[in-house]
Image: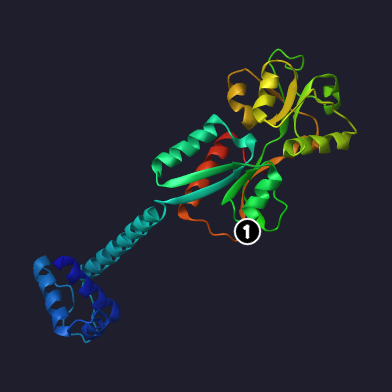
């Protein structure tokens, strides 16, 4: 402790130019500062201040001591900042608005790992369609959201946007399974599963239909991505999903994703959104970074 105090006295005296200025700064008698610096020189066995000068000039050893103390203070500042940051994320609630398309075993693992690391935090996930998620983020009812779209609300911004085309998802033994790509019009003769009108995926499919003057008659309409995936997995028909949603089944060979020759289907994006200008707490920011890394591991960034 004495060594740190003596280093500080030397540092302030050198920084301010005189022992009197350091005395005023530290509210310590000038004689005490002189005495402590002399004790430090005796302890080190080296002169730290050149003699015979009114303004302090450090020796080479003095400069080394000055730099050491400054570096020590910088490390202490980083340490205290880190402690304050950790203290600030010990408790609280993080609110997410998430489309069902994002919910997967891998996504759940990201959340579970985060909650294990920060057990004092509560993570509240609200399943929301794109429009609802944007509204929740805009009104600060959700810290951030995941949507299958690019936000068009000026009060909401995308922190991360990734390309994720809609593809035809089929069983490996489906008639289309060997195709490199398909045209939208070719799919009319097959049984198709589609989400309800409130889902952004259904709205994108409708835009694609209008662009080509094609009408697809669904054999199944569901408000669950899981049901649509199972519809294709059992071989009853095909559905339209982003690849990342069916990634486990695609990797296992239980489903196949076929590109669709349609500009609307191929221009879709997913986004992680926040309210424009909102400063989020440290815990929220850390979870956002983890989810962003998770999404990037599944999807190549949009160009």
Residue 292 or 65: which is nearer the viewer? 292
Tell me the residue that label 1 is attached to: 276
Q: x, y percentage for residue 255? A: 65, 20
Q: Would residue 113 appear left or right of 66 to someone viewing this image?
A: right
Residue 225 or 276: which is nearer the viewer? 225
How crowded pointer 1 is (Cα within 10 Å; few <14, some 14-19, many 20+) is rated as: some
Q: x, y percentage for residue 78? A: 35, 59
Q: Would residue 284 appear left or right of 178 to someone viewing this image?
A: left
Residue 173 or 15: which is nearer the viewer? 173
The image's colour scheme reads: rainbow
Kindly state the secondary structure of the residue where label 1 is placed.
Answer: loop
Q: Is residue 279 above or below residue 232?
A: below
Q: Residue at x 45, y 41 (%)?
A: 114
Q: Residue at x 53, y 32 (%)?
A: 106
Residue 74 location, quadrant: bottom left
Residue 156 or 137: which is nearer the viewer? 137
Q: Is residue 103 above or below residue 151?
A: above
Q: x, y percentage for residue 279? A: 54, 59
Quadrant into which the C terminus falls: top right
Q: Is residue 42 above or below residue 219?
A: below
Residue 24 location, quadrant: bottom left
């Amino acid at each position: 402790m004495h060594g740190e105090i003596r280093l500080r006295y030397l540092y302030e005296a050198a920084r301010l130019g005189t022992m009197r200025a350091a005395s005023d700064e530290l509210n310590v008698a000038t004689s005490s500062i002189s005495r402590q610096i002399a004790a430090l020189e005796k302890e080190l066995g080296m002169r730290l201040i050149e003699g015979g000068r009114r303004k302090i000039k450090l020796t080479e050893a003095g400069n080394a001591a000055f730099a050491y103390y400054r570096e020590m203070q910088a490390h202490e500042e980083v340490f205290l900042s880190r402690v304050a940051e950790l203290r600030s994320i010990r408790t609280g609630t993080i609110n997410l608005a998430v489309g069902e398309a994002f919910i997967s075993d891998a996504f759940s693992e990201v959340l579970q790992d985060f909650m294990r690391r920060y057990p004092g935090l509560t993570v509240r996930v609200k399943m929301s369609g794109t429009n609802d998620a944007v509204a929740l983020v805009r009104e600060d009812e959700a810290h951030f959201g995941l949507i299958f779209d690019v936000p068009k609300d000026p009060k909401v911004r995308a922190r991360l946007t990734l390309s994720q085309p809609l593809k035809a998802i089929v069983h490996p033994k489906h008639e289309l399974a060997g195709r490199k790509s398909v045209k939208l019009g070719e799919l009319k003769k097959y049984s198709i599963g589609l989400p309800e009108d409130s889902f952004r995926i259904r709205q994108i499919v409708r835009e694609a239909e209008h662009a080509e003057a094609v009408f697809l008659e669904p054999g199944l309409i569901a408000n669950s991505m899981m049901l649509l995936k199972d519809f294709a997995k059992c071989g009853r028909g095909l559905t339209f999903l982003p690849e990342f949603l069916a990634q486990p089944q695609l990797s296992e060979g239980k489903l196949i994703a076929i590109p669709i020759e349609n500009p609307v289907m191929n221009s879709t994006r997913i986004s992680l959104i926040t309210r424009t200008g909102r400063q989020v707490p440290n815990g929220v920011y850390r979870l956002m970074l983890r989810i962003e890394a998770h999404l990037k591991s599944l999807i190549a960034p949009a160009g």
